[in-house]
Amino acid sequence: MLTQRPRGTTDLLPGEVERWQAAEETIRSVFRRYHYGEIRTPVFEHTELFARGVGESTDIVSKEMYTFLDRGERSLTLRPEGTAGVVRAYVENKLYGNPGLTKLYYIEAMFRYEKPQKGRERQFHQYGCEVLGADHPAVDAEVITLNVHLLRTLGLQDLHVELNSVGCGVCRPAHKARMIAALTPHRHELCRDCQQRLDRNPLRIFDCKNEHCQAVLRTSGAPTILEALCDDCRAHFSSVREMLESIGTAYEVNDRLVRGLDYYTRTAWEITVPSYGTVAGGGRYNGLVAMIGGPETPGIGFAGGMERALMLLAEQGRDLRAPTGLDVFVTVADEAGEPMAMRLLQDLRAAGVTADRDYLGRSLKAQFKAADREAAKFVAIIGETEVQQGSVSLKDLQSGEQVALPVSDIVSYLAEKVGVQS
Ligand code: ATP
Ligand code: MG
């Protein structure tokens, strides 16, 4: 027990963590290019926020939340997704008072009680963004494009955009009634979850992973939401499509796509890699801000899983930037070299050079081996001779070239060699 992490969690160790850092850096830089600012919200929120904001009928709320009572008997929940917390922060901090759109992004840990399997963890990470304050279809087209751009910049290939509109408060009630009418005669053929969905939110039946439910749906004559859109939603959807076409972002319409969260209105999309499945998804949520108590404000956003993106990158044979190794390994030949070695090590680090040393009093040969193992670019050798002569021997491990330089020149020489800007 003491030496075992909880199911569905991961230790990211040095070696792997550099891939994450590289991916995070890429994601941040793409978000910055689109003029988004980062937001960091609490890991836990009041349970009610997710229950209302994500929706009682979703898998997330009905089966996957990490909910607990704190010592003050308040019900809190580890965030299962990012949007609800960001929207809560937007309202609480009155960001709607700022002029223009609010464009926010995050890269954070999420928690869902799921059956762990490949690409599915209980603590996982999402990158995502939210744009608050505009219903203009150009925003939808741009956010979808940004979603693809991010994944492409990470190096992912074979990305497909599936697009749908899930309507609004005007068209959904009529559609709901038509679905209930079409599916009620087939109620007993649906899975238990879908029988509940039929009562609470029939549109979600399109999201059921059970093949049989999908077959019932097809033969029942239940209309897709796309067929039942009101005029405004229909016009919005066709503008989004036109704008995607002018940008040159390829997509396919999938009229069965509804996405996992209850609060979506109008545009909904998923990005898939056919050999795997969904890697990211998003949608518009024009009712959410008002629903949690803010002013009527349209919003749109997406989220993607970091674990899945990194896993697919590895599978597609596209690794991220190799981990940055050590610039200099300082070997200490004998006791007499200690003071000079310590001083040099610290001066190198102060100048921005990555440096480390041996602390185990090992033989020079063993220290060189260690330098190799760490993929150090240079080895500095310091011992009694070097101290007496006031110089340091430097070996370039790639070329094998060795030089002796005055101590005072070492730092600037190495800083230039490894390309540190001071
Ligand atoms: P799925 O149908 O796979 O359960 P979802 O609809 O629950 O996905 P979203 O809530 O849309 O997923 O989350 C967006 C992305 O977050 C997913 O496309 C996926 O990449 C990632 N994701 C979701 N749940 C997990 C998890 N438990 N572990 C790892 N990544 C996850
Ligand atoms: Mg899920």
Image (tube, grey):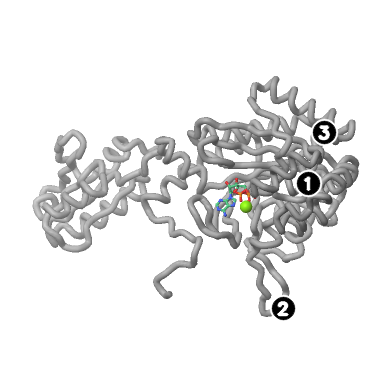
Name the mark on residue 70.
none
Tell me the tag on residue 203: 1
- Secondary structure type for disc 3: helix
Other residues around mark 1 within 10 Å, as few (<14) / some (14–19) / many (≥20): many
Looking at the picture, does residue 105 appear above or below residue 77?
above
Earlier in the chain: of badge 3 and badge 1, it is: 1
Asked which secondary structure carries label 1, the reply is: helix
Q: Residue at x 43, y 56 (%)?
A: 12
The type of residue carrying mark 3 is Glu
Mark 2 or 1: in front is 1
State which quarter of the image contains the N terminus: bottom left
The one nearer the camera, 150 or 113, is 113
Residue annotated with mark 2: 73
Report the front residue among 89 and 245: 245
What is the quadrant of the C terminus in the image?
top left
Q: Is residue 47 toward the left or the right of residue 161 in the image?
A: right
The amino acid type, in three-letter code, at marker 2 is Glu
The percent position of residue 309, horizontal first and vertical second, equals 51, 42
Q: Residue under label 3, please give it.
A: 227
Q: What amino acid is at disc 1?
A: Leu
Q: What element carries label 2?
A: loop
Q: For the residues marked 3 and 1, what is the alpha-carbon distance in whole angstroms?
A: 13 Å
User: How far is the residue under mark 2 from the one under mark 1?
Assistant: 35 Å
Q: Which of 307 and 93 is in front in this view?
A: 307
Q: Can residue 64 be seen in this view?
A: yes
Foreground label between 2 and 3: 3
Q: Residue at x 16, y 62 (%)?
A: 361
